[in-house]
Amino acid sequence: MIGIDRTQAPAFRQVEHIDLIKAQQHTLDNGISLFSIHAPEQELVRIEFIFANVNWDSKKPLQAFAVNNMLVEGAGSLNASEIAERIDFYGAFLQTDYSYDYSTVTLYTLNKHLQATLPIVKEVVSDAVFPKEELDTFIRNQKQKLNVNLEKNDFISRRVFNHALFADTIYGFMVEESDYDKIVRSDLINYYESAYQPKNCTIIVSGNADDSVIAFINTLFGDNWAKTNPLAENNFSFKAGTGELHFIERPDALQSAIRIGQVSLSRRHPDFASLQVLNTVLGGYFGSRLMANIREDKGFTYGIGSALVSFKDTGYFYIASEVGTDVCQAALDEIQKEINILQSIPVPEHELQLVKNYILGSMLAGLENVFSHADKFKNIYFSGMSYDYYDNYIETVKTITAAQLLDLAGTYLHFDQMEKVIAGKM
């Protein structure tokens, strides 16, 4: 038997194209857009009801969050225990998810149990009751959770950073304990009636999403669900930062949490894919320059990374780490040095090729099931883009040059303009 020569790296082949299972559009009888990503070999279906967060009010900043969390605490004639027990009985899973831009209700169920489980979801999204006892418990638990988190430097640095970038918008509002006291059941019902209605809903079905599944969803959600409360889309504007240092002293801290960054690009911007490559070089994977310098060489931290985040209205770039308090300033200096290098010295070809292979390989590895294909569709649909985005993204990664990365670093990475948040000691 011929052995493997482990002195030679295995041959690799560059990813040329990614075949995505394309979403098919349907329209329910009442106008709701439904998109199906069909994989007939599955016996499982995931149904996501996605609602845009609306009616932002800084005087009532927790409305969307509280409503989404309270949906399964009682709906129609069912209390929280009954909802959970009925879903569990069929081996299904029902969850609610809140993000800054959207709130989601998701059902995972075997196709054979869809007719038993989906009507429960209908109750949740159309007839939630927000019982007072459960609401009081929610408020009490959230206050306790906030107070626990406020003892964590990483949490403090993140919330101060978001506020520095986005001020009192939904992206940057710094919630205080007193904000939970402003939660009133009648306000939640009013918000629910505005946000959780057909004209603010998109349904995405993935798995064994055949015609019978679509027809049953239309039967439940396409005709007798007709809220018409007024709603106002959340729209915000943002400005570049001034590069301030925000220091939150924690006298007993053994580590300082660092978060540095600035308002940046959303996925819709033509430079987004290129900037993703640059971010990967800097801090976007385990072999990045920040990891090699600040973790491997200097030993200042167990981990450091950077990311480019896209929202509906904007995006931002950030670097985050936790370091020993005695090396906090030294870590900041090294971060600045790495950014300066990207602006002055082209990325070597072997490093650039490694990063390209990593990005393309990660994209391919991230498509392990039909739900991953649905997630890729959500990224483009809610950004107002088509599937061409992914072809263009791959082409950008494959062809971008060191000279282009040099220009990008000079255009988008300005350490002096980045907000710098330190929670701990310096």
Image: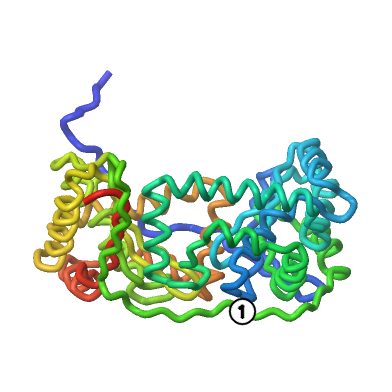
Q: Residue at x 69, y 73 (%)?
A: 200
Q: Disc 1 on helix, strand or loop? A: loop
Residue at image location 58% in from the left, 57% down from the top: 374
Horizontal and vertical percent position of residue 313: 48, 75
Front one among 290 and 335: 335
Residues packed near mark 1 inside 10 Å, few (<14), some (14 to 19) or many (20 plus): few
Instruction: Give above or below for 247 relative to 194.
Output: above
User: How many numbered markers are drawn?
Assistant: 1
Judged left or right of residue 243, residue 266 is right
Q: Which residue is mark 1?
A: 233
> Residue 159: x and y, percent?
42, 59
**Residue 285 appears in the figure:** no
Amino acid type of the residue that numbered disc 1 sits on in the rendered structure: Glu
Q: Is residue 89 above or below residue 42?
A: above
| Near-viewer residue (378 or 184) | 184
Q: Please say which color scheme the image uses.
A: rainbow
Quadrant in the picture for residue 283:
bottom left
Asked where in the image residue 298 lies, by quadrant, the reply is: top left
Side of 46 where 245 appears, left or right = left
- Res. 382 in view: yes
Percent coordinates x, y for residue 27 in the rendering = 74, 72
- In the displayed image of the protein, which residue is found farthest to the left? 345
Q: How far across and down, in percent of the image, does residue 199 sit?
A: 73, 75
Quadrant location of the N terminus in the rendered image: top left
Residue at the image point whose x is 62% and y is 58% from the top? 180
Give me the residue at 36% from left, 58% from top: 16
